[in-house]
Image (cartoon, grey):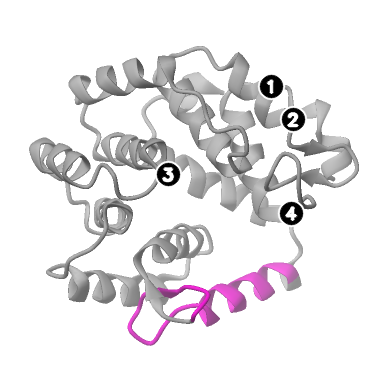
Amino acid sequence: MKKHVDNIPIYRQFISFLSEGLNVLDEDAVHSIRKFVTSEQHVSGGFQDRAQAPDMYYSLFGYWLSSALNLNSQLEKLKDFISSEKEKEHQIVEQFAMMLMETGLFSKKHKTSLVIKLFFKHKYAGNFAYQLFLLLLLVDASGRKMWLVRWGASLFLRFYKSEENAPCSMVAALLVAKQELGLKTNIETQKLLSYFDDKNGFKTFLHTGEADMLSTSVALFALRKSGFDMRLVAPVLL
């Protein structure tokens, strides 16, 4: 698979992954999903968080879903939301989410110096590894090589170990990042598989909770990108 997607940004691979999933559902199921995604868009054009307020990070996922579902009207409203939020102050995760959407919706390429400056300016705002993952997504989406960023990320990830009770999605993000940078992923693959419940799917946390659809979806995307033999988990998940 890898030789066919080397030049496709990861976020577009993810949208394609969603589209493939929609193709195996019946018409009623797809209609229900389209209706749900549409209902989650705020009147401002952004997608809502749990408090039903427009949120830049949630909007990034709304963008990916709307693209996979060909919800063009929702995408146009989302463009208006991004434009209205452009001059406001945002935390680094929200800033990177907005820049990722600008890349996809407006074909905008951000200056390397600006991206790096933002990253180090807010380096302690939240989980450092996840900020690095979003940075790499942005670098990948821009189409630029940015070898210095990739080299620095490779050096950091060679020695980085995820927290003992890190959520499944964090381990999956680490697996994708290391795979894209050409690093060994055996440890991350095995750790991600440790979240697998052989009766239900992937759990959010290693030692607590039950399997859920979101963790399962993220884990599957990461495992497929790493070249894992999906037949080993497919029977249970289906």
Which amino acid is tagged 4? Asp
Whichever of callouts 4 and 3 sits on the residue coming sooner in the sequence is 3
Mark 1 → mark 4, Cα distance in angstroms: 19 Å
- Range of magenta residues: 29-51
Whichever of callouts 3 and 2 sits on the residue coming sooner in the sequence is 3
Residue 190 shows which numbered tag?
1
- Asked if disc 4 and disc 3 are in contact, CB closer than 8 Å, the reply is no
Residue 199 on the magenta segment: no
The mark closer to the camera, 4 or 2, is: 2
Residue at 65% x, 56% y: name it: 22
Tag 2 residue = 194
Q: Against 164, is 167 above or below?
A: below
Quarter of the image where the N terminus is located: top right
Along the viewing direction, whichever of 132 and 163 lies nearer the viewer: 163
- Asked if disc 1 and disc 4 are in contact, CB closer than 8 Å, the reply is no
For label 4, the SS is loop
Residue at 12% x, 41% y: name it: 117
Along the viewing direction, whichever of 74 and 50 lies nearer the viewer: 50
Q: Against 44, is 163 above or below?
A: above
Mark 3 → mark 2, Cα distance in angstroms: 28 Å
- Asked if disc 4 and disc 2 are in contact, CB closer than 8 Å, the reply is no
Tag 3 residue = 12
Tag 4 residue = 212
Residue at 73% x, 36% y: name it: 195
Residue 31 on the magenta segment: yes
